[in-house]
Image (cartoon, grey):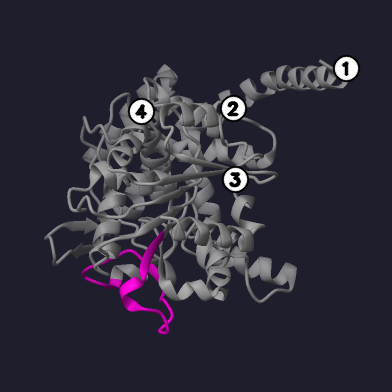
Amino acid sequence: MSDSTFLAKWRRKCAKHLLSVPNFVVFSYLDFLDSVFCVIYKHLDLLFEGKASPCYCTTKKIDINGQLSDDNEISETLQYGKRKKLKELVVLLRFVEDLLNKSKGFEAIYISKNRKNGDFYRVGNRWSDCGCDSCISWMKTDDPKLHVEVNKASSQGNPNRTENVIFIHGILSSSSFWTKTLFPKLSESKKMKEYQMYAVDILGHGKSPKPRDSLYTLKEHVEWIEKSLISEYKLNSFHVVAHSMGCIIGLAPSNLSPLLPLSFNIKIEWFQPYFPSKEGVEMRAMKWLTPKRLWPPTAFIWSIMVWYEHLSRCVCLLVCRNHRFWEALIKRLTSSRDVNFLVMDWTKHIHHSGWHTTHNVLYIGVKEMDKNLETLMKLKKRVHVIVGSRDKTSPPDFRHNIKTKFPDVELHNIPNAGHRSIILTRETDFAHNLFHIWENT
């Protein structure tokens, strides 16, 4: 080991130990603060809606109506750390709950009936969510569906040879991740006449519905994609291109969907870290992907959004509910007519959808990866895993683990590419690679 390497590791180790003390102090305070806001939001929800919304400050799983639940689709990460709540706050919380149960008020909700399957959705937005026309437009239909952007194949192509491609984005993103970056590059190619592309806004994101009675489980995401995209457009075969959390959703139909015939040509280009399925994998994924850290600032914000249910709601109240103000401010400061789509996507969700999707898809989904990949391998489906060499979301043993357990998975390493820059800074190369993969299917 060279002296420079040794010094670099020593500095990193010292910095880690020095930050551990302020980390403990700050996050201990945030633990307390989150408990306080639990009580505050119960009062505010009662005041504005007539009913306090259920939360995960109990030690047992609850459903959307506040009833105890044994649903295995609810992530164990939602309960982590709640048992450490201070005794005094637990007593206070129970007192407030008893008080609220005796109170009467009104509950402003909007009920929408799905005419096809008879399901009812409680979709009225919370007082802490944005109520602008663009955010609640999906409520104006009796049969809400996911928003889908379609890029049709060229009319010059042979319709009998046209192939379908479904693009699925990641957490706190939307179909714009694909339509603003990759679609223009794909459309420039003459090969595009053979492909019809569909970019979907997953449930709770972008322009898609954001129902309040949903727990945004992996199964729900798959069912909504089936209803809004696969069945709606009568897709008999398709490729799947997915990024980040979207890869978990893209893999899921192999085991969650009884509607999909085995003849479906599902081929996945995958950009999601792989964690071997074993006991405690949800917590391992949570601690690896979003550890409690003060630095850099983005990591600190993610720590709040993932570890603290009520503090993250405060962030959404400030940012998402007032997204029109922030968009106008950014335009004024940058003298630009448009706001970057990445910023727009981050603010166009609600706390309920973002919180549950993160835990019930991103973290619980890693537990299902092995089973889903095994099913795809048995069905002789081709899976391409594309990962950047600088992707810090990937565990160090990521490549070794996936190739050891699934040797038929095709692994592509992209040098000097990060989790997002694997696409955002190399759209032309990435489009070329996709065509090459599709042509050799």
Q: Magenta segment, which residues?
A: 140-166
In the image, residue 251 sits, relative to residue 175, either above or below, namely above
x and y percentages locating residue 202 in the rendered image: 38, 56
Q: Which mark is drawn over residue 419?
A: 3
Amino acid at the residue labelled 4: Glu
| Distance Cα–Cα, label 4 vs label 3 | 26 Å
Q: Is residue 244 magenta?
A: no
The percent coordinates of residue 144 (x first, y second) are 26, 66
* Residue on which disc 1 sits: 3
Percent position of residue 24, x then y: 62, 21
Which corner quadrant holds the N terminus?
A: top right
Q: Please state which of the two labelled residues, at mark 4 or mark 3, is closer to the viewer.
A: 3
- Say what secondary structure mark 3 lies in: loop
Q: Position of residue 212 (x, y in %)?
A: 30, 52
Q: Which structural element holds mark 1? A: helix
**Residue at 40% over, 63% down:** 165
Which amino acid, mark 3?
His
Image quadrant containing the C terminus? bottom left
- Taking the spot 38% from the left edge, 55% from the top edge, the residue there is 204
Give the labeled residue for mark 2.
Answer: 396
CA gap, disc 1 and disc 3:
31 Å
Q: Earlier in the sequence, mark 4 or mark 3?
A: 4
Which residue position holds label 4?
76
Q: Which sits earlier in the primary sequence, circle 2 or circle 4? A: 4
Q: Secondary structure at mark 2?
A: loop
Q: Is residue 30 visible?
A: no
* Mark-to-mark CA distance, 2 and 3: 14 Å
Q: Which callout, 4 or 1, points at the residue further toward the start of the chain?
A: 1
Q: Find the distance from the CA under tag 2 to the CA under tag 4.
A: 24 Å
Question: In this view of the protein, can residue 21 be seen by the observer?
Answer: yes
